[in-house]
Amino acid sequence: MGRISLEGVRKSFGPHVIIKGADLDIADGSFVVFVGPSGCGKTTLLRLIAGLEDVSGGRILIDGVNVVGVPPAKRGLSMVFQSYALYPHMSVRGNIGFGLKMAGLPRAEIDRRVEAAAATLNLTPYLDRKPRELSGGQRQRVAIGRAIVREPKAFLFDEPLSNLDAALRVQMRLEVTKLQRQLATTAIYVTHDQIEAMTMADQIVVLNAGNIEQYGSPLELYERPANLFVAGFIGSPRMNFIGGPAAQRYGAVTIGFRPEHLKASREGEGWEGKVSVAEHLGSDTFLHVEVSEIGSLNTRAVGELGLAPGDRVRLLPDPHRIYRFDRDGKAMST
Amino acid sequence: MTEQTQRVGRLALTPAVALLFVWMIVPLGMTIYFSLLHYSLLNPGTESFIGLDNYFYFLTDPAFLYSMRNTLVLVGSVLAITIVFGTLIALLLDQAVIGRSIVRLMVIAPFFVMPTVSALVWKNLLMHPVSGLFAFIATSLGFTPIDWFADAPLFAIILIVAWQWLPFATLILLTALQSLDEEQKEAAEMDGAGALSSFFYITLPHLARPITVVILIETIFLLTVFAEIFVTTGGGPGLATTNIAFLIYLQALIQFDVGTASAGGLVAVVLANIVAFFLVRIVGRNLDA
Amino acid sequence: MPRAVSPGRKWLTTVLAWAVGFVIFFPILWMVLASFKTELEAFAIPPSFVSFHWTLENYAAVQSRSDYVHHALNSIIIAGGSTLIALLIAIPAAWSMAFAPTRRTRDLLLWMLSTKMMPPVGVLVPIYLLYRTFGLLDTRAGLIIVLCLGNLPIVVWMLFTYFKEIPKDILEAARMDGATVGRELVYVLTPMAVPGIASTLLLNVILAWNEAFWTLNLSTSEAAPLTVFIASYSSPEGLFWARLSAASTLAIAPILVLGWFSQRQLVRGLTFGAVK
């Protein structure tokens, strides 16, 4: 079983507080993504769970047992590193089987498990090759193979796809998700890419400067962001934020609405503005519009609008999709 | 990094640190202690505390001043020869040369020859006034051969030591030259710099740091030249080729004057420390980079 | 890609470089030539370069002298032994500094290097007296101890620089895979660092083999390595020059070969990283 809980977990390096106090409950078998900007502490949190760093305070429970102080090997977890961290002097077989060798399993058992993992990951023809003879994607799969062969309580992924090119990344995203579902093992996945987070996760943990801003399903985070940060982080392109008198009219300090909820038309109601940049993707159009007294707004429309830079345009937000935020940046109830 | 790793880390360091600490402190402590005694191995059991008298005797002994002069001349000359020729040879080897690796081998070789072998080869095969090669060359050109070790002993030693250390300087400077960005040279060329200005404004400044390092490291090791003197002149004639290291050796193991030798040893340590201070600073700066 | 050089210029630099190389290498060459001459021809005037009676009698004489073999063996044992022991002590220390560094690590490293900068003559007296008291004079063990401690800073330093080039996360992966620190060192770090360890071994064997201060002062016959043996030829009777040349050639030949392979290590090890 792979239930993981964090209770008041804190981490500081000297005077710098990296994790301010994390409380989290990760259900067995779920795919949880830690997401946030650089330096938010997501990798640190992962390494605390792995046991590669010591906590400065709090408890980490794996299946109800506090593992603080327990070395990584004894926590029953596997990790896939960003750089794959394969052993260059061992073959693929040796890499995948190393953990089992350390655990003292008999040779026959090691071979059996290694070959099973290799089959799952389409690595069988490469078993006797060395890492330097493999492509990036293949190395990635060896790293995953090394993790799954130990049948851990949970997988820990540290930005595993960021070293791959875009096309491979999309393909590996699907493979990782399918694999996790197939193995039904808990997975904690760290990324800075919110699209990866949204597409792969059962639950997302949004981190910012050492704080957990929100923890929920992708749709929850999209539809009911808890504060300014989450609202601005989730969703691409970024949500539009307006302060000042326009916001006050709605009874809030800041209001926000997503580009896809901002309707653009040549005539009609709404704010008047001038198109500064138009991005035509064929399937979508992104317009950057300068609106006097408000500033720059982004809007997204499906299909082609036929608008060009310099054109005058009217922007109307969907009234049911306006988010209101108070002075502290917290979301106000609608 | 976890607490556990840190703990193991400290443990792993302990043997090396402890051994080096003992290696440093114990002998050095003993040297300091002995330097404050009147202690001669010829009369064991008559040691007496005489405070700083040993230092006084040592530092005012004309032999000390003479050996100090010899040391400075030796170190200075070898530095000059190795750096000047080292730079020139490094520049030469940085060019396109057919069979460059073999030339490198020939230039590097002297550094790897045992000092005792070098010294004897130079003394007997080359510099011998009757049957050495130099003598032969001199007589065939109509000159009288120089009796190196009688007429110019310190110069002979300088020659031998410089020959041994030239590869070191050359190798270091060649490595530094090859790390000089090709693009910098090309930019200078586009800016109209000729070969000579390119050398003075681009290459030489780039070499300033490695040359400094070579000077510092060579000085530290040259201060204690010993084997070459031991094997060729034994410090003579008279004290003509006695440097600080040899003087201390003479006092310790020939005259068995432990007290004075210890005082001398400490003087040598202080001298080396001055140079080491600067070297450690440079190394430290590099470590942070 | 360097531009092509005019052939004229290339020939000039080539001739110049070869001339310089030849001049510098000449003493060694001359010695090797002398080793193949008869004693008479070795100091004959005028000296001959090629047209002399080549003979192997000197090498035969050297080989048959049992004390030559004895001293060569000493050199091997002392150089090899001191370096291997230094490696055993240095590998964990370098691992610690590279992968478990503390605030003090940098200063510790600099301090270690500074111990190498101490002039040996400064501690000649106490070491000599200590050795005399403990019966370590003229023993192989005694020499191994001194040389090991003398070279330890360089061994630690070089291993440290090589270890730092190993990515930390590979060692962390080993830890996640269940390796203790010891097994991490044995199964992952050492195999990955083999080139670096070999280079360090090479350079330090060379330094220990050529060491000519402690060996000259702390040994006389029993434990004397080749440095001392050759030095014993320094008496002015030049009748054994050819034999001396043969002995010397045998003494330095292995080191010259090793030295050729360790040029880069020389720069790394002896400039303490101050030159890249």
Image (cartoon, rainbow, N blue to C red):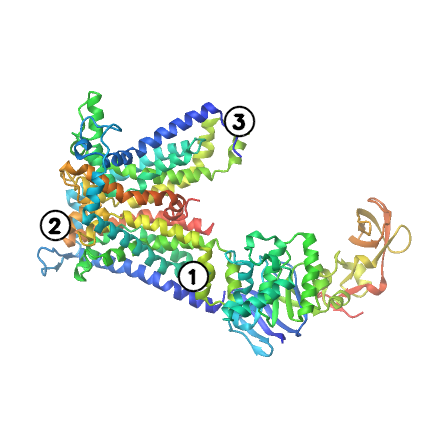
Image vertical order of residue A284 relative to residue B85, above or below: below
Q: Is residue A143 left or right of residue B249?
A: right
Q: Which of the two residues, C42 or A99, is positioned nearer the viewer here?
A: C42
Image vertical order of residue A60 relative to residue B88, above or below: below
Residue found at x 75% / y 57%: A236
| Residues tagged by mark 1 and mark 3 found on one chain of the structure | no
* Amino acid at the residue labelled 3: Gly
Give how far apart the Cα atoms at labels 2 and 3 are.
65 Å
Q: Is residue B212 left or right of residue A102?
A: left
| Label annotation for residue B255 | 2
Q: Secondary structure at mark 3?
A: loop
Q: Which of the two residues, C51 or B97, is positioned nearer the viewer here?
A: C51
**In which quadrant of the rendered image does the C terminus of chain A lie?**
bottom right
From the image, tell me which residue sits under label 3. Answer: B192
Q: Are marks 2 and 3 in contact (CB under 8 Å)?
A: no
**Within 10 angstroms of label 2, few (less than 14), some, or many (20 or more) residues?**
some
Q: Secondary structure at mark 2?
A: loop
Q: Position of residue C10 (x, y in %)?
A: 45, 26
Mark closer to the observer (1, 3): 1
From the image, tell me which residue sits under label 1. Answer: C96
Residue found at x 85% / y 45%: A311
Q: Which of the two residues, C63 or C244, is positioned nearer the viewer here?
A: C63
* Amino acid at the residue labelled 1: Ser
Q: Which image quadrant for residue A35?
A: bottom right
